[in-house]
Amino acid sequence: MKAPNPIERAKAKARKSICRFKIAAWGENDRGTVIDITFNSPRFIRKGGGIHSEMLLMHRNPKSLAKIYILRINNSGKLLPISPCESCQKKADKLGIKIISVTVQ
């Protein structure tokens, strides 16, 4: 049986998020192997702030990542537009990681 593609795996992870925006990211090494898949989560119980899925990937796997793919879905699982925030993009640039947004096909 064939393993699900990374987009479907990331969508399943994004559905687990309790945040208003359901976002997931997966990271690949320089050979294209998926290393990890994460989703965004709140930092605190109170409203506001949170840990971005791409930032979590960079914290977990700083040396093995070459590319990060991010996606956002609505409640029915449809892909929505997304781009990394300024902080995540700066950290990725510093580490030499390319961030790619997965958008509507």
Image (spheres, grey):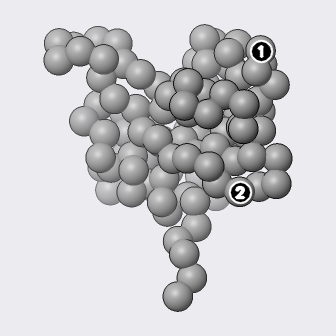
Relative to 45, does residue 24 appear above or below in the rendering?
below
Residue 31 relative to residue 102: left or right: right
Q: Residue at x 62, y 49 (%)?
A: 35
Q: Which residue in the protein does label 1 denote?
A: 94
The label number, if any, that marks residue 12 in the structure image:
none
Residue sitting at the far left: 45
Ranked by sequence position, the earlier of labels 1 and 2 is: 2
Residue 6 relative to residue 49: left or right: right
Amino acid type for the residue under numbered disc 1: Lys
Residue sitting at the far bottom: 1
On-image quarter of the C terminus: bottom right
| Viewer-proximal residue among 74 and 44 | 44
Q: Which residue in the protein does label 2 denote?
A: 33
Residue 102 in sight from this viewpoint:
no
Relative to 33, does residue 95 appear above or below in the rendering?
above
Residue 20 in percent (x, y) is at 29, 31
Residue 98 in sight from this viewpoint:
yes
Q: Is the residue under label 2 in contact with that under label 1 (CB below 8 Å)? A: no
Q: Quadrant of residue 7?
A: bottom right
Mark 1 and mark 2: span between their CA atoms?
22 Å
Q: Residue at x 77, y 15 (%)?
A: 94
Relative to 35, does residue 17 appear above or below in the rendering?
above
Relative to 46, does residue 10 appear above or below in the rendering?
below
At mark 2, the secondary structure is loop
Residue 76 in percent (x, y) is at 32, 56
Question: How busy is the neighbourhood of tag 1: few (under 14 within 10 Å), some, or many (20 plus)?
Answer: few
Amino acid type for the residue under numbered disc 2: Thr
